[in-house]
Image (tube, grey):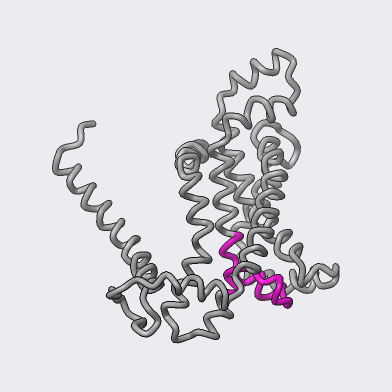
């Protein structure tokens, strides 16, 4: 099907519109973060000079080095546990037929439809009974469990879309299922795995309710929770708040920029077949 010049122009106009809608708020936040504190305001302003000292002030006053470290620990552990459990489970659901496999798979998917607010209170009492509250495990384990449903679904779709002839050829060569997974499927699944890791990392990094309920110690606060307390202390200092918000978002933005090629490839190939 041939696309006319008018259709191309319309596509570009729509893309430019969505790009502007996405970038204008981000540019506004960056400009606010670089605005001198005596000129800052709640609206969109263009400063007459740039003040990079807002980032240094926010970093020091907010003690974000400690909170970002907590977020890195929680996010890294959650992604690692999720992928270690989800990849073999997805392979089993995609390539093995065992009694109750479809029922179990759909039960796992049901977990995606239950809002976090519905189970946060009983989860708190369960973790408190196990002595895990006010620790990193009270954030890592629930977030990993919460992420398993999507990750299993995502990787299962990729494994289903993988050519079956290659798997059968590996079996004819005497490869066991474990070797097929690790030496045949996983090397080609790098884009899908990268996409899943980035999504789980983003969800975990931005999580607010779980740390708010589970964490009491200030030293174990994650970055988004610390930002909320920082906002309460500087509620009218808009430049400082914008700088703090930029610092919190920067690690995930940088991670996406570094891995975006694999992320886009995974988005195009990871959900081909249901």
Identified at 74% across, 28% down, the residue is 178
The residue positioned 64% from the left and 51% from the top of the image is 149
Residue furthest to the top: 173
Query: Relative to residue 267, is residue 40 depicted above or below?
Result: below
Image coords of residue 169 (percent x, y): 64, 15
Q: Is residue 144 left or right of residue 241?
A: right
Q: Residue drawn 27% across and 51% down? A: 15
Quadrant housing residue 213:
bottom right
Residue 79 or 124: which is nearer the viewer?
79
- Image x and y of residue 122, in percent: 75, 72
Q: Relative to residue 52, is residue 94 depicted above or below?
A: above
Q: Give the residue at the far left of this rendering.
A: 6
- Locate the C terminus and report the quarter of the image it occupies: top right
Main secondary structure along the magenta-highlighted residues: helix
Magenta includes 63?
no
Question: Within the image, what quadrant is residue 34 found in?
Answer: bottom left
- The one nearer the camera, 58 or 220, is 58
Looking at the picture, how far across and down is residue 139, in whole percent?
70, 64
Q: Residue at x 64, y 59 (%)?
A: 72
The residue segment tinted magenta is 204-226
Q: Is residue 225 magenta?
A: yes
């Amino acid at each position: 099907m041939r696309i006319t010049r008018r259709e191309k122009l319309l596509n570009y106009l729509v893309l430019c519109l969505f790009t502007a809608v996405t970038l204008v708020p981000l540019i506004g936040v960056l400009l606010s973060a670089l605005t001198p504190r005596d000129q800052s305001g709640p609206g969109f302003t263009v400063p007459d000079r740039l003040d990079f000292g807002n980032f240094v002030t926010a970093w020091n006053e907010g003690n974000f080095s400690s909170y970002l470290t907590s977020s890195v620990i929680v996010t890294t552990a959650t992604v690692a546990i999720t992928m270690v459990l989800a990849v073999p489970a997805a392979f089993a659901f995609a390539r093995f037929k065992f009694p109750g496999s479809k029922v179990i798979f759909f039960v796992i998917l049901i977990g995606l439809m239950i809002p976090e607010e519905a189970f946060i209170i009983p989860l708190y009492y369960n973790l408190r009974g196990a002595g895990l509250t006010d620790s990193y495990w009270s954030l890592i384990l629930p977030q990993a469990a919460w992420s398993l449903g999507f990750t299993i679904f995502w990787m299962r779709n990729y494994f289903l879309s993988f050519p079956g002839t290659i798997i059968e050829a590996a079996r004819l060569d005497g490869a066991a299922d474990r070797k097929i997974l690790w030496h045949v499927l996983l090397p080609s699944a790098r884009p899908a795995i990268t996409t899943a890791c980035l999504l789980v990392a983003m969800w975990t990094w931005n999580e607010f309710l779980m740390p708010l309920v589970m964490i009491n110690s200030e030293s174990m606060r994650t970055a988004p929770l610390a930002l909320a307390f920082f906002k309460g202390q500087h509620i009218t200092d808009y430049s400082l708040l914008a700088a703090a918000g930029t610092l919190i978002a920067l690690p995930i933005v940088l991670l996406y920029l570094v891995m975006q090629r694999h992320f886009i490839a995974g988005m195009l190939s990871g959900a081909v077949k249901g």
